Image (spheres, grey):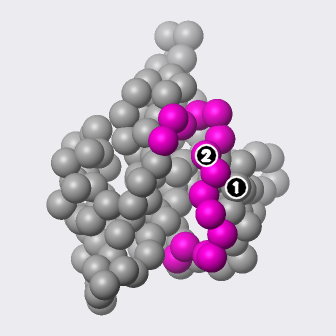
Amino acid sequence: MVKIKKGILAILYKKENKKILYALFKRKKGWIGYEFLKGGKEANETDEQALFREVKEEASLSITSAIKSKYAYSFESKKNDELIRHELAVFYVKMPKDEIHIGPEHSEFGFYDYETVLRRLSFRTLKELFKKINAELLK
């Protein structure tokens, strides 16, 4: 039996010199590699509430708005021989003036252009999603 875990994926971005730069975080807990911020929803929490909480927990940013993408992201993982399907709502978050301070799940972060993000992302499915997200954001 597959357990379903709902959550969010937050794509933080900023515009600099007419280019969009995306925040990538280097994960150190569970696995090592680059990712966007993501996290699970708690009981009775909306997607937006989960987004605001996760961005606060993982990047120390207080956000009050975001744009929900028409795309979603899903992947599977295993924990104690149990298959878990993660179903994540995807949001674009324009960087506020605050500075990012990473939490314990990540060792570093940086802002990168489109090509660098594609090179650094670890998973093919996330790269494919990012291509769609970038096109959607540029509209």
Depth order, front residue of 125/3? 125
Dot 2 and dot 1 residues touching (CB under 8 Å): yes
Q: Quadrant of the C terminus?
A: bottom left
66 relative to 131, above or below: below
Q: Amino acid at mark 2?
A: Ile
Question: Is residue 95 one of those drawn in magenta?
Answer: yes
State the residue position of label 2.
102
Q: CA distance from mark 2 to mark 1?
A: 7 Å
x, y (%) of residue 112? Answer: 32, 61
**Which residue lies at the image location 24% right of the left edge and 65% below the top edge?**
114
Q: State whether residue 135 appears in this view.
A: yes
Depth order, front residue of 76/24? 24
Span highlighted in magenta in the image: 94-108
Label 1 crowd (10 A; few <14 / some 14-19 / many >=20): some
x, y (%) of residue 138? Answer: 29, 84
The secondary structure that dominates the magenta segment is loop
Q: Which mark is residue 135?
A: none
Q: Which mark is residue 60?
A: 1
Q: Could you tell me which secondary element the residue under label 2 belongs to?
A: loop
Label 2 crowd (10 A; few <14 / some 14-19 / many >=20): some
68 relative to 130, above or below: below
**Which residue lies at the image location 51% right of the left edge and 55% below the top edge?**
9
Decide if residue 59 is on the left or right side of residue 74: right
